[in-house]
Amino acid sequence: MTDIILDVRGLQKHFPIRRGLMRRLVGQVKAVDGVSFAIRRGETLALVGESGCGKTTTARCILRAVPPSAGQVNFTLEGRTVDLATLPRRQLRPLRRHMQMVFQDPYSSLNPRMVVGDIIGEPLLINGMSNRAERRARVVELMELVQLPAAYFNRFPHAFSGGQRQRIGIARALALNPGLIVAGEPVSALDVSVQAQILNLMLDLQDRRGLTYLFVAHDLSVVKHVSDRVAVMYVGRIVELAETETLY
């Protein structure tokens, strides 16, 4: 695989430190300080490191959940490459369907006031699928894809276990057929026995749908199981990047 889908160059995110009544700038926290890596289409790159090293902030900058301070985030889609770091928000919005996230906490990432069918179908509705029957059919297809019975369509999130909620989150992320999925420690909040089920599901979906993963984690046993390459972060920088077998 030589087809690059994401090329991050010199990414920085500095948070200002302000003090006093006038909120005077006295310093900066360099959460991400010159991170560079590339991800090939169809592979899994794991971003690992201790808590506070900047790996989650890096993922959020790539998705423009927070604006980067500097650097490039080159995303290639259908032969066209755009820099997500500098793209105006109006031009960024149509691209968001091609980049989705699976969140760490399956308990807080789902709206407790919405039933499962509406949660999974919300991206479809936002992106123009107004026909209710078509939307329901697509949601049922996605539920079956992540091994959830269609009979759960009208249940609320509180009725599900952590593993089932994470399956709902994965189905929601897949609704718009994205090319890149950023998984922010997607199994760290789950029991060990359930972790293996979710990881195997993600690997199966990758094989069947050609997905590309940026997998953020700190559990090295999990990373070894799912990744093709590993980037190790420390105090905002990547200090090592290698094929998984070579690094371990």
Image: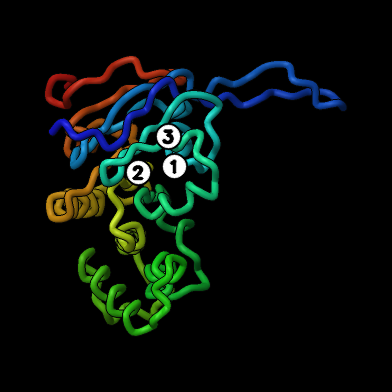
Residue sitting at the far front:
80
**Residue 83 numbered tag:** 3
- Amino acid found under the numbered disc labelled 2: Val
N-term mark: 2 or 1: 1
**Residue 161 numbered tag:** none
Q: Secondary structure at mark 2?
A: strand
Within-10-Å neighbours for mark 2: few <14, some 14–19, many 20+? many
- Percent of width and height locating residue 31: 52, 24
Tell me if residue 96 comes above or below residue 171 in the rendering.
above
Which corner quadrant holds the C terminus? top left
- Percent of width and height locating residue 3: 19, 34
Q: Residue at x 33, y 29 (%)?
A: 7
- Percent of width and height locating residue 243: 16, 24
Callout 2–callout 1 Cβ contact below 8 Å: yes
Tell me if residue 248 comes above or below residue 149 in the rendering.
above
Nearer to us: label 2 or label 3: 3
Between marks 3 and 1, how big is the CA–CA gap?
Answer: 11 Å
Which of the 4 quarters of the picture holds residue 142? bottom left
User: Is residue 208 among the parts visible in the rendering?
Assistant: yes
Callout 2–callout 3 Cβ contact below 8 Å: no
- Amino acid found under the numbered disc labelled 3: Asp
Q: Residue at x 49, y 41 (%)?
A: 64
Residue 229 vs residue 188, the one in the foreground = 229
- Amino acid found under the numbered disc labelled 1: Leu
**Residue 63 numbered tag:** 1
Q: How is the image coloured?
A: rainbow
Which corner quadrant holds the N terminus? top left
Which of the 4 quarters of the picture holds residue 143? bottom left
Nearer to us: label 3 or label 1: 3
Tell me if residue 214 comes above or below residue 132 in the rendering.
above
Q: Residue at x 21, y 39 (%)?
A: 41
